[in-house]
Amino acid sequence: MSQEDQPLDESCMLSFFWRNGSETPEPLKADVSGSIPSWLQGTLLRNGPGLFSVGDTAYKHWFDGMALIHSFTFKDGDVFYKSKFLKSETFKKNTTANRIIVTEFGTLAYPDPCKSIFAKTFSYLLNVIPDFTDNNLINIIKYGEDYYASSEVNYINQIDPLTLDTLGRSNYRNHIALSLATAHPHYDDDGNTYNMGMAIMNFSKPQYVIFKVPANASEKDKPALSKLEQICSIPFRSTLYPSYFHSFGMTENYIVFVEQAFKLDVLNLATAYFRGVNWGSCLTFDKDDMTIIHLVNRKTGKTLSTKYYADAFVVFHHINAYEEDGHVVFDLITYQDSNLYDMFYIRNMRQDIDEFIKTNKDFSSPTCQRFVLPINIDKETPPDTNLVKLQDTTATAVLRQDGSLFCTPDMLFKGLELPGINYKYNSKKYRYFYGSRVEWSPYPNKLAKVDILTRKHIEWVDEEGYPSEPVFVASPDAIEEDDGVILSSVVSLNPQKPPFLLVLDAKSFKEIARASINATVHMDLHGLFIPETST
């Protein structure tokens, strides 16, 4: 058995990232200190990897761990904690076999090491078109009135947001030609859900697909996806190298899709199983390529004819987007390379702290940037003219000889990831965003609130804790954008200190309460808050 196949050694200082989690299936009352606002009633649902070894086998990448969903329910000043593994088909197969037999992003698995040559060859042929895992560990999506654990594959698993039970699996392919879909949709004011994916293996030309699931999609005995509506499709600029995308932007009238130079090598993907390499190795960043930005009218489904270009970068998370005075403004977090994924291979995280820092010292820092796209272009405008007319940004969009626009961004903030906003301002002009500070340290132990207007920020710090993605919950009588609270699950790095759910006043960014949990709490990725009236 190779070193990477050995059970994980939790003596490593970074083992809090990839230690096996455990279930807390019944509500556990937390020990609350401070004062939780009386209006805060509902459930914070979180999703992330929670099981990293099965039997004598272990995952090779942090993003491969099997999904462990947990919740924090607020009721009349009390907080109750609960967690359950997502009982996906992947979970069932792996636990039944007592070994990892389903391939993930960074871990190649073979169902039966004792197969005959014929059986192995047959497996290779089946995996030319991968049947992806349904280990939905990234986020929670709401379609209609139903909630689904999601990742970036064609499967999603419905869950009960109160009990955390897994209710059943849905396949996008049964409703639309999709090979992959994002785990970061958008919701409009009417409750409709917008998402996008890509169709790699279908009878027509490979394409990106934007779709909508109506607010009234939930019906008894029918999956919410049965009412899915395709809005539009965008052809790949390169059939064999489609752009990877983790999220997208949305304004009142437009979908913003960034076709980046971080790409999926389709031929490598199709032969990955045969060559014995994981899917993660099929992603490649072409630093000499260009970024193409597509604007799609989300009501008509038509893509604007204007071509918007930018230098190459890597993007995972959009922050927000909106329209102002004939421009589309969108904010996102960019990198100058694709090394982020490599950092989370377990072999890297098993190094001692000094070696880990040395290995990753050239890590590209996440940079929050603003792009501004003029919508209407006067045909009489001479080339080399900057068409951005907004006064509060240094972003440019310069007209080129061929009628396209070359865009350069305005830097908003450096060193922040996992962004969140007051979602009532999604698709609207806004002032504040929140996120996890990423200064170079093995322990990202800070949350930040960024003021776009003043370009200043404030922080909350816990030297012995790792806070999760901050989630904003608006107060019911909110007048200003930052009237509300920030919620974050904090994993303790100190064995003598329990994990806790942090409650910050969003305006001052000061702690007003914490709910300490007498149970194991794992690190997570994304989630959402469900007000009590919705549950």
Image: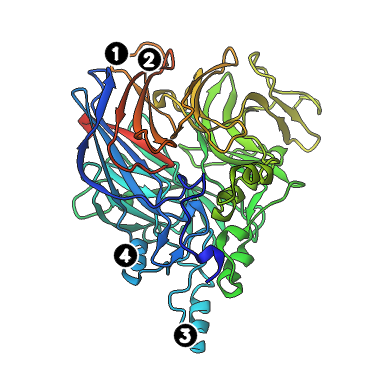
Query: How much space separates mark 4 and mark 1, taking CA atoms?
Result: 45 Å
Question: What's the residue at 23%, 51% (across, down)?
Answer: 165
Q: Which residue is mark 3?
A: 119
Q: Which residue is mark 4?
A: 92
Q: Are marks 4 and 1 in contact (CB under 8 Å)?
A: no
Residue 477's disc number: 1
Say which amino acid is labelled 3: Ala
* Drawn side of residue 474 relative to residue 300, left or right: left
Whichever of callouts 1 and 3 sits on the residue coming sooner in the sequence is: 3
Helix, strand or loop at label 3? It is: helix
Question: What's the residue at 21%, 41% (across, down)?
Answer: 162
The mark closer to the camera, 4 or 1, is 4
Crowding around mark 2 (Cα neighbors within 10 Å: few <14, some 14 to 19, many 20+) is some
Whichever of callouts 4 and 1 sits on the residue coming sooner in the sequence is: 4
Residue 154 visible at all: yes
Crowding around mark 1 (Cα neighbors within 10 Å: few <14, some 14 to 19, many 20+) is few
The mark closer to the camera, 4 or 3, is 4
